[in-house]
Image (cartoon, rainbow, N blue to C red):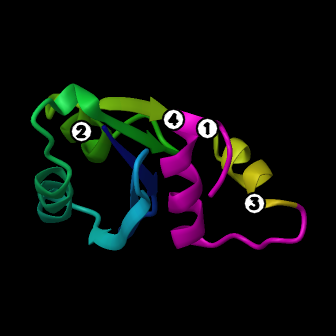
Amino acid sequence: MLGVGIDWAQEFHDIALITPEKGVIEAFRIAHGPDGVSRLITRCLEPDPAEVRVVLETRHGLLVEALVDAGFAVVPVNPDVVACRRGPARKKDDAGDARICCCLPWTGTSP
């Protein structure tokens, strides 16, 4: 099983990948558009696409549609959920928010 956390933005998306066995295994950025989304889907392919859990802070648009079409389980979360996991003293950090999102399917907590 692969967890994918995405911090959605207008021009790019920060991505974090996690497995239950290894924890966070990779973090990277993709462009907002068909090429970036294709790169993400190719990187996240598992033998069974239903074993990919994606958490992100939006529920519509090209990115969400492509992930659903690929067969991934997509879970949109309110950005306030991610902000609460950051803690009271931590500023918004796109890569950090992607890491928080990728952990949510298993623990409900941040890394």
Label 3 and label 1: CA atoms lie apart by 15 Å
Quadrant housing the C terminus: bottom right
Please check the rendered image and state whether residue 69 is part of the magenta-colored stretch, yes or no: no
Question: Which residue appears at 26% of the width and 31% of the height?
Answer: 51
Judge whether residue 15 can be spotted in this image. Answer: no
Q: Which residue is mark 3?
A: 86
Amino acid type assigned to the residue bearing label 1 in the image: Thr
What residue is pinned by disc 2? Answer: 67
Q: Are marks 1 and 2 in contact (CB under 8 Å)?
A: no
Badges 3 and 2: C-beta atoms under 8 Å apart?
no
Q: Earlier in the sequence, mark 1 or mark 2?
A: 2
Q: Which residues lie in the magenta part? A: 88-111
Distance between the alpha carbons at the discs numbered 4 and 3: 16 Å
Q: Which residue is mark 1?
A: 107
Which is nearer the N-term, disc 2 or disc 4?
Answer: 2
- Which residue is denoted by mark 4 in the rendering? 105
19 is higher (above) or lower (below) than 53: below
Residue at left offset 59%, top offset 55%: 100
Circle number at residue 22: none
Query: Which label's residue is closer to the chain start, 3 or 2?
Result: 2
Q: Is there a contact, CB below 8 Å, between mark 2 and mark 4?
A: no
> Disc 4 marks which amino acid?
Pro
Residue 91 or residue 63, whichever sits in front:
91
Q: What whole-number distance in Å separates the C-alpha atoms at marks 3 and 2?
A: 26 Å
Mark 2, Cα crowd under 10 Å, few <14 / some 14-19 / many 20+, is many
Picture coordinates of residue 72, whole percent (x, y): 25, 32
Number of the front mark, 3 or 1: 1
Residue 13 at what x, y percent from top left?
38, 64
Q: How many marks?
A: 4
The label nearer to you, 3 versus 2, is 3
